Image (cartoon, rainbow, N blue to C red):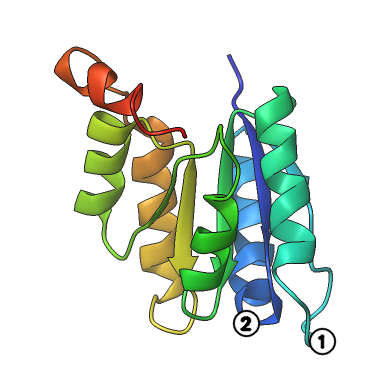
Amino acid sequence: MSKKIAIGGDHAGYYHKEKLVKWLRSEGYEVTDFGPFNADSADYPDFVHPACEAIEKGDCDFGILICGSGQGVTITANKHQKIRAALCWDTDLAAVTRQHNNSNVVCIAARWTAYELAESIVKTFLTTEFEGGRHQRRVDKISC
């Protein structure tokens, strides 16, 4: 089964996003790119909210959000009740946030994360399963 991916960010994450879109498609993922579509200054909420709405509606299974620090996209994404976004700067964090938090969005700091590492983080995030069990009880308590 192909996973459907929503991707977006801002101008600082544009180049990583573009490379990730190409790589994800070559790996067989369906990718919906919410922008931005160039490196001009852009406001990340304009792209994060539609990406998260696509996940909440079930049009996409997971999200990848990229901005300069990763903080802005993470904060914005987590305003959505059905989104569990995690800022990850290594593959161990990407694995544990899937295993324990059932995160459905990975956020990346483009200015502090080399592209090769970003790709590894995304690969780990998308291929790691939620463990459920005792973690499900905690995940069920997250939404307000």
Residue 19 visible here: yes
Q: Position of residue 118 (x, y in %)?
A: 42, 63
Q: Residues within 10 Å of mark 2 (few under 14, many from 20)?
A: many
Identified at 61% across, 21% down, the residue is 2
Which quadrant: the N terminus? Answer: top right
Q: Nearer the viewer, residue 81 or 37?
A: 81
Image quadrant of residue 87?
bottom left
State the mark number for residue 135. Answer: none
Q: Is residue 7 above or below residue 46?
A: above
Residue 99 appears at what percent x and percent y?
A: 25, 30
Identity of the amino acid at label 2? Answer: Ala
* Element at label 2: helix
Lateral position of residue 20 relative to residue 107, left or right: right
The answer to which image quadrant residue 17 occupies is bottom right
Quadrant position of residue 96: top left
To which residue does mark 2 refer?
12
Where is 5 relative to 140, above or below? below
Q: Nearer the viewer, residue 26 or 95?
A: 95
Q: Residue at x 21, y 23 (%)?
A: 135
Q: Label 1: which residue?
A: 40
Residue type indicated by callout 1: Asp
Can residue 33 be seen here? The reply is no
Measure the alpha-carbon separation of dots 1 and 2.
9 Å
In front of the other: 127 or 71 = 71
Marked residue nearer the N-terminal end (1 or 2): 2
SS for dot 1: loop
